[in-house]
Amino acid sequence: MNPGKLVGMIIPDGTNQFFSTLAQLFQRELAQRQCGLFVANSDGSKSRELSNLTLFFSMNVDGIVFISVGDSSESFRHLAEFTRPVIVLDREIPLENADFVLTDNAHGIRMAVDYLASLGHRKIGYIQGAMTTEPGRERYSSFMEIMGSLEIPVDKSMIFPGDFLFGSGTSAADKLLAMPRETWPSALLASNDLMALGAMQRLQESGIKIPDDISIIGYDDIILASWAYPRLTTVRQDAIMIARVGAGFLLDRLDKQDLENQNYAESRVSLVSPTLVKRNSCSLFKAANDLGVEK
Ligand code: RIB
């Protein structure tokens, strides 16, 4: 591949370390082949995402790396017209002739629920991610399926809506704090770290002890997860592997384009396994009377 190519990467939310770290890692991979990366942030906005795509088209970039803000069909239509390589990371979208690097979210949620169950938790709350994204939908459906397979009843009042932002975590905590303590779950699974940290902060501000009063587990393993107090137990997405595989797919396509002046016809999909990172925000289940909670 000729050095000096420029690739455009679109991330949905630059304030989330999951995406900024992924962009940083992707840039490192491309730099090894003297390929530049231009990162554009969509700020959670479909219109901004579309503007970013239009910008990259006008810049005549050599390839696009795309993480969607959510079900943005107009962006997907635009992408389908792009004749050069497209690599989709993290959030699967309906697009042909592209390569996909995704996390095995069913496995990730299975590890989180199995871990909480192994600590004796039988009442587990859940904070949903953006249900306009495949990871949001997949993690929630996996949670419900796994809870069913373990015969752990799900209390629908303990399923809190979310959008992967910190504020969804604080809102979920506010709802929980408004409920009688004896009705609370003993553990809370947030489908990303920012919402787990938001819930943890709001609960702690109200005098709730983590994990003594309620265990909390997140998903991503952003840098902040290990800086929080208590340090957040979470499901680590392998950002290094996602970036490495995605950059490999892209460079393959760029090389092929140089050689044969055409893009791959078929799509390639790589599913990257997450891992469970046990820190200090989860503990063994304690019965209510052990917590001194009035009946
Ligand atoms: O934290 C943002 C979430 O949205 C991550 O879990 C990532 O998978 C993305 O889809």
Image (cartoon, rainbow, N blue to C red):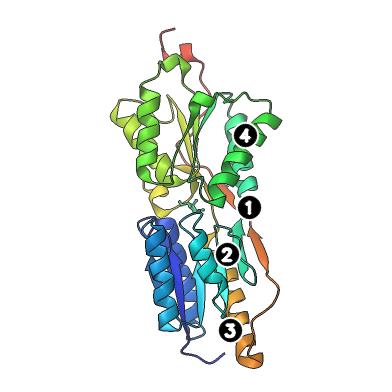
Query: Label 4 vs label 1: CA separation?
Result: 16 Å
Query: Label 3 vs label 4: CA separation?
Result: 41 Å
Identify the residue at image location x=47%, y=51%.
Answer: 221
For the view shown, which residue lies furthest in the top direction?
A: 295
Neighbours of disc 3 within 10 Å: few (<14), some (14-19), many (20+): many
Identify the residue at image location x=64%, y=46%.
Answer: 106
Secondary structure of residue under mark 1: loop
For residue 205, side relative to residue 168 (left or right): left
Quick check: marks 1 and 2 in contact, CB under 8 Å? no
Residue behind mark 4: 144
Query: Label 3 vs label 1: CA separation?
Result: 27 Å
Q: Is mark 4 within 8 Å of ligand 1?
A: no
Secondary structure of residue under mark 2: helix
Towards the viewer: 14 or 220? 14
Quadrant that contains the C terminus: top left
Nearer mark to the viewer, of 1 and 2: 1
Secondary structure of residue under mark 4: helix
Residue behind mark 3: 254
Q: Is residue 202 above or below residue 242?
A: above
Give amino acid for label 3: Leu
Residue behind mark 1: 104
Give amino acid for label 2: Met
Query: Label 4 vs label 2: CA separation?
Result: 28 Å
